[in-house]
Image: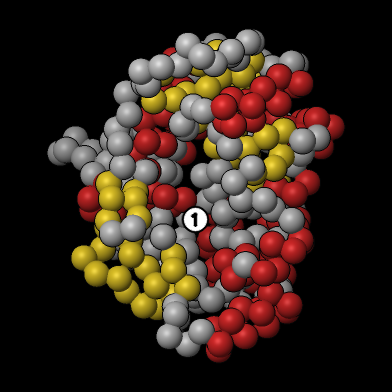
Amino acid sequence: MDKVLIALQGTLNEKTLNCAKTFLKLKYDVLMISWRINQFSKYDFGEIKVDFINDPGTVNYGLYGVNALRQIVSNRYILDNYGVFYDYIIRLRNDIELTNVKQFKRQLNLAIKKDKIWTININTTSPRLLNPVSLPNHISDWFFGGKPKKLKEYLQLDNIDEQKLISDKSRIFKNLEFRRNAQNEQVIWSMAWASDSSKGSPKLLFDKPWRNNSRKNSYNYALFLSRNFFISPFRLSGLQSIKYRINIKGWYRSSYSLFILNNFEIYLINNNFLRVLLFYPPILRLILFKIKNFLKKVEPLSMQ
């Protein structure tokens, strides 16, 4: 059995600590990475190890904020301090709880057998042609795992200038409103940045989070996902978010679900049926998305 570390990242409070405690059922080491706070002695950590690191903060713009650097700093800390002690590291948001041990271990055992990054469909975008927009390299920042060497290869571990992620003005594209030059799900991965960072902070390789949704671009993204990632459906992973409850009702009510991979698409990617994936029609989700766009003509869907 590989030595596995479960590392939860984010603000420490009673709710997130309770989420971390659910992972003790796995009999793996559980670690929480959080920001330094003045009073934390009131919490009973039990078997959970808690490391406090300096908070790089967030960059606020209007009602929104960018917290990609928080993720980068946490990921780097985990790999630098624990990478040599574990065969496999899983990093996830700290507002996710374990709800089904058997389901989780089933997916974990499948993931460990592959020399890929393990992730989930939330919020990994689909490369199919019927997507409203193509978001290249938009891979979940909720959950990912892998061998430490593989994670170091794929994650962006150098500090970035978050100010450069904010667009001077919001941009409308196909009834979608973008306020950033890139999304968190894109910028935490090294493929979004120039490899030479010797001249200061890394340079972002694109200035908008979308691209033309052509057959070639869709296929290349599908091939990239298939070669480098093993994707699990979140609803079948034995996990649940206490902040964003994932269920059938919410899935079809949310306009954002059209961008996200569903179970059949995940199967096609994991088994390399990519040409079938490109033309897969998510009929019901597409219809609901079109209806919402029609009813809210003056309210583009906001992509943060």
Visible residue check, residue 19: yes
Q: Quadrant of the C terminus?
A: bottom left
Q: Residue at x 29, y 32 (%)?
A: 56
Q: Residue at x 47, y 23 (%)?
A: 33
Q: Inspect the image, locate mark 1, and give the three-letter code of the amino acid beneath it.
A: His
Left or right, 39 with reference to 124: left
Q: Quadrant of the N terminus?
A: top right
- 198 w.r.t. 233: above or below: above
What x and y, as percent, mark residue 237? 74, 42
Q: How many marks?
A: 1
Q: Which residue is mark 1?
A: 138
What x and y, as percent, mark residue 113? 73, 32
Relative depth, front residue between 213 and 246? 246
Q: Secondary structure at mark 1?
A: loop
- 81 w.r.t. 115: above or below: above
Left or right, 193 with reference to 140: left
What x and y, as percent, mark residue 159? 28, 35
Visible residue check, residue 144: no
Left or right, 268 with reference to 88: right
Left or right, 142 with reference to 240: left
Chosen colour scheme: secondary structure
Query: Which image quarter: residue 258?
Result: bottom right
Query: Which image quarter: residue 8?
Result: top right
| Residue lying furthest right | 102
Q: Residue at x 58, y 37 (%)?
A: 95
Relative depth, front residue between 71 and 36? 36
- 65 w.r.t. 2: above or below: below
